[in-house]
Amino acid sequence: MNIAELEALKAVAETGSFTRAADRLGMSQPGLSRQIQRLERELGTRLLERRGTGAILTDAGRESMQFAIRTISDFDALVSRFGPDPSALSGVIRIVASSTPAEYLVPALISEFTQEHTGISVEVLVADSAQVARTLGDRQADLGLSGMPSSSVGYSSIAMAKDEVVLAVSANHKFADLRSITIDQLRDENIIEREGGSGTWQTVVQALSAAGVELPEHKVSMTLGSTQAVIAAVGQTLGVGFVTQHAVSSHSNNVVAIRIDGLSLERDLSLTYETGRVRGRHTQAFIDFVDAKSS
């Protein structure tokens, strides 16, 4: 087994096609097929099921794919750390970010970082906070950004910015002229909820639990998968919803932020990374950059 064979498996799995995978890797299709066949012989099992011009992973292939992702990532990190031209930083940093930091922190952060390090590019995957943790755990990303820093053993977090979760209401809602309300005033309101994996929603749930209170009886008008979707629905007077203060500030013409008395809804937006993982110099440079800005 070698890196080239693992890269071949990864390329076929990601493209779903031997032809597209060969094009991506800059090799012939027969050459790619031979690499896959050698890997299957070494492992003693079929990894791909051929379907016409395409291919899908078998159960063994899916397990092997996770191994391939981790191994290729670690190998790339070693090459970056110990390879030639140690004075030049280059490579790709893969970041998985929840919607709040992805929308309000990442663009300016990456712009400033890549101006200093022109040989480094950054890929950003947007997911909810629960998916951020899973993606990091599967090593499908190098770094994570969310409002729910990991408490798992083997991970470290750097608090980058303060954020506050507020109740968003439309500008013509009965609460719009109030600076704050009690939790009981939400009784019978149509509440637009976020999906269960949302860090914003978990901040609300944890704050309610810490205060020893529950949301009063209310109507869940809908459950949405992004901050922007909640803001849009609130603006259309479909209900009220908990979102980041950043989002309300960007839509202040038709949406108003209201605080809830007695609830602490502040949180840190944090960069999370695996402490024991081999990292390339380019990824470590980004961690150091964030750490310096946050200290």
Image: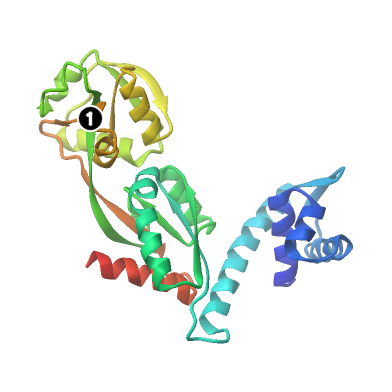
| Quadrant of the image containing the C terminus | bottom left
Side of 39 relative to 162 (left or right): right
From where the camera sits, is residue 152 visible? yes
Side of 290 relative to 180 (left or right): right
The quarter of the picture where residue 80 lies is bottom right
Side of 115 relative to 49 (left or right): left
Q: Secondary structure at mark 1?
A: strand
**Residue 148 position (above or below residue 271):** above
Q: How many marks?
A: 1
Instruction: Give whichever of 79, 156 is nearer the camera.
Output: 79
**Residue 79 position (above or below residue 133):** below
Residue 289: x and y, percent?
34, 70
Residue 56: x and y, percent?
76, 46
Crowd rating for badge 1 (residues with CA inside 10 Å; few <14, some 14–19, many 20+):
many
For badge 1, the amino acid type reads Leu
| Quadrant of the image containing the N terminus | bottom right
The quarter of the picture where residue 224 lies is top left
Side of 23 relative to 234 (left or right): right
For image coordinates 20% across by 40% down, the residue present is 265
Residue matched to label 1: 167
From where the camera sits, is residue 57 visible? no
